[in-house]
Image (spheres, rainbow, N blue to C red):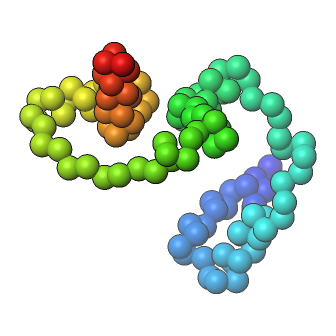
Amino acid sequence: MKPDCDMAKKKKSFFDMTPAERDRDVARFDKPLPDSAFKPLSPKQRSLFDRMRGPKSAPPSAQSSAAAVKATVRVDLDAGLIKQLDTIAKRKHLTRSELIEQGLRGMLASFV
């Protein structure tokens, strides 16, 4: 039995296609996805999704207007200290600025 011609033929590379063939190939992306394509995330997927989104911040109504204003400050730090800072920030899923801000807030709170 002879194999079906469509199955025996390899799919052409996108870059080897003519413009008309490319248009036909990508037309499937123009249609909206059916509702059946969506499902709730599994607990493992939800955990990964939450980690990718990063830490939850307070809603805008909970932030004071003074806290929303940020200023850029140039500070000279030891290279070893910056390396430690970046390591901890990465482990806690924070930016360098967020970690420094948390540290300063904690330090200032201890003086009050």
Q: How far from the left and from the top, in percent, is residue 82?
A: 18, 34
Q: How far from the left and from the top, in percent, is residue 60?
A: 63, 43
The C terminus is located in which quarter?
top left
Q: How far from the left and from the top, in percent, is residue 52?
A: 54, 35
Residue sticking out furthest to the right: 35
Q: Residue at x 60, y 34 (%)?
A: 58
Q: Residue at x 34, y 16 (%)?
A: 110
Relative height, residue 84 to residue 31 (above, below) = above
Q: Residue at x 58, y 69 (%)?
A: 14
Quarter of the figure with residue 59: top right
Q: Would you say 108 lies left or right of 55 here?
A: left
Number of on-image labels: 0
Residue in the foreground of this view, choosing between 79 and 26: 79
Q: Residue at x 66, y 75 (%)?
A: 22
Q: Would you say 75 lies left or right of 61 here?
A: left
Relative height, residue 9 to residue 47 (above, below) = below
Is residue 89 at least partly visible in the picture?
A: no
Residue sticking out furthest to the top: 110
Residue in the foreground of this view, choosing between 23 and 110: 110
Residue in the foreground of this view, choosing between 47 and 8: 47
Residue in the foreground of this view, choosing between 95 and 66: 66
Q: How far from the left and from the top, in percent, is residue 71?
A: 35, 52
